[in-house]
Image: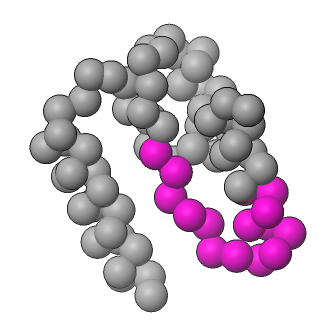
Amino acid sequence: MDGLESTRRIREFEHTKAHRPATVIALTGLASEDVQREAYASGIDVFMTKPVRLKTLEDTISNIDSESAKTR
């Protein structure tokens, strides 16, 4: 199962169990617009293409944590 299918299953589980959505970050070597479009359609929240600087990934996660804390 790839990340897109995994995300679709996660989203279906969240929906059927009425869970708050988890934030899903895709980190991939595939940079095409079609792949990115399919990722977002699958329910992925953040799409990042390798190589990704560690600082960029840390900032992305920090921003997600900050937004999540506001909604609690």
Q: Position of residue 62 (x, y in %)?
A: 24, 62
Instruction: Identify the residue at image location x=71%, y=55%.
Output: 10
Instruction: Identify the residue at image location x=72%, y=56%.
Output: 11
Which color scheme is applied?
Answer: one colour
Q: Position of residue 35 (x, y in %)?
A: 58, 19
Relative to 54, say whether 58 is above or below.
below
Q: Quadrant of the C terminus?
A: bottom left
Instruction: Identify the residue at image location x=56%, y=64%.
Output: 22
Q: Position of residue 56 (x, y in %)?
A: 19, 41
| Residue 41 in view here | no
- Number of numbered discs overlaid on the protein picture: 0
Instruction: Identify the residue at image location x=35%, y=62%.
Output: 64
Q: Quadrant of the N terminus?
A: top right
Relative to 13, say whether 31 is above or below.
above
- In magenta stretch: residue 63: no
Q: Name the image quarter holding residue 44.
A: top right
Left or right? Give the position of 6 relative to 23: right
Left or right? Give the position of 27 relative to 6: left
The residue lying toward the viewer, choosing from 10 and 70, is 10
The residue lying toward the viewer, choosing from 54 and 68, is 54
Specify the segment rendered in magenta.
11-25
- In magenta stretch: residue 22: yes
Q: Position of residue 71 (x, y in %)?
A: 44, 82
